Amino acid sequence: MRLEPIANPTALRQAGLPLLALAATVVAGSLLALVAGADPFATLGLIVKGAAGSKFAALETLNRATPLIFTGLAVAVAFRARLWNIGAEAQLYAGAIVTVILGTGAIGSPMVLPVTVLAAMLAGALVLLGPVLLKTRLGVDEVVTTLLLNFIMLLFVGYLLEGPMKDPMGMGWPKSAALVKEARLPRIVTGLRLHWGFALALIAAVAVWLIQTRTTLGYEMRAVGQNIRAARFAGIPVNRVLVKTALLSGGLAALAGYSEVAGLKGHLTKDISPGFGYTGIIVAMLALLHPLGVIVSALFVAGIFVGADSMSRAAGVPTYIADMLLALALLFMVLAILLTRFRVVRG
């Protein structure tokens, strides 16, 4: 058996295989519920009900999807140019740190929101700039450098929360001071947790789509991602494109940290992200690296997490099923992408 490239995959193949991958994920989830001793149909129903069965549940899903849209976009932008950014977690925390620094009274109220957004994006961009310069100048693998930066940033955040940024009124808990009211993102629905960070995420997705489809930079990013040698031969400044891609990707990931601090938490803690940076990779892959598809896949992933919490309480099934579902969804989607571009033949 061997893989043979498909020159021009049909539209049916390109759309059908990813849908088949999602269907396989549902079947696999049903089997997992059965193994856990629960009714598989009832379990899936409880996940759907927990994610979208009420106004509160639906808004919580949108709330959980907000940082996933940002990190999914960051990964999708980078991967499109074959820049393997595994460090969205570090960039997220960089944005969160800057948000706290500027949002606790360092800037006057009229300009605090736009300045904080731009500063957070700059911080995330600079965090990814180092690895991309090491890649373009010295050939250092960015997978290693961006991954290691995640752990370095977590240690740095721990130091800040136990030292310079520790809230003196926090009763000893390792957290930062709270943001001033003017630096907080307002709620979309009064009394519920959904904030305007979700709207910012939607705007970011549309902006990235426009960049990728309507600008020279987007064309260059796609060209570099498809064939770096051909791009160089065509006169595209590959290293410059990679640097621009890194700045955009890092800035988008930092917005996840900004939205969590300014829109939801109000202060910085070490566990402000339960792995949004890593989950962003799943979101981007499920979306086939399409920026608008990231919105849909982020809602899907957020719905699984929110619905799994409700399902676990109602059916007594471990919430780890949600993690397994996402892992299976990623594996099935990678296989679907592979079979979209290649066919299995004998010989």
Image (spheres, rainbow, N blue to C red):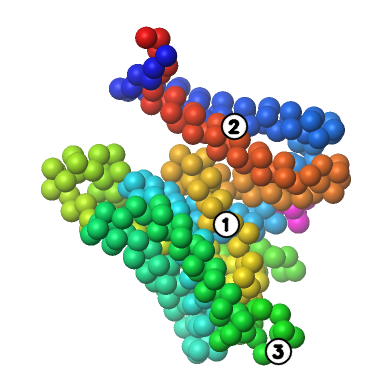
* Residue neighbourhood size for the residue with mark 1, other residues' Cα within 10 Å, grouped as few (<14), some (14–19), many (≥20): many
Which residue lies at the image location 23% right of the left edge and 43% below the top edge?
228
Q: Can you give x and y, in whole percent of width and height, for residue 4 in the image?
A: 35, 19
Q: Secondary structure at mark 1?
A: helix
Q: Which residue is mark 1?
A: 276
Q: Secondary structure at mark 2?
A: helix
Amino acid bearing label 2: Leu
Q: Single out the mark in the foreground, 1 or 2.
A: 1
Quadrant where the N terminus sits is top left
- Nearer to us in this view, 249 or 55: 249
- Asked if marks 1 and 2 touch (Cβ < 8 Å), the reply is no
Amino acid bearing label 3: Met
Lower position in the chain sequence, tag 1 or tag 2 = 2
Measure the alpha-carbon separation of dots 3 and 2.
48 Å
Which residue lies at the image location 69% right of the left edge and 49% below the top edge?
305
Which stretch appears magenta?
Answer: 53-58
- Nearer to us in this view, 131 or 230: 131
Which residue lies at the image location 48% right of the left edge and 46% below the top edge?
284
Q: Can you give x and y, in whole percent of width and height, for residue 134 in the image?
A: 29, 61
**Eyeballing the image, is 36 above or below 7?**
below
Q: Which mark is residue 169?
A: 3
**Eyeballing the image, is 113 above or below 2?**
below
Please, what is the dominant secondary structure of the magenta stretch? helix
Amino acid bearing label 1: Phe
* Residue neighbourhood size for the residue with mark 2, other residues' Cα within 10 Å, grouped as few (<14), some (14–19), many (≥20): some
Quadrant where the C terminus sits is top left
Q: Which residue is mark 2?
A: 22
Lower position in the chain sequence, tag 3 or tag 2 = 2
Measure the alpha-carbon separation of dots 3 and 1.
28 Å
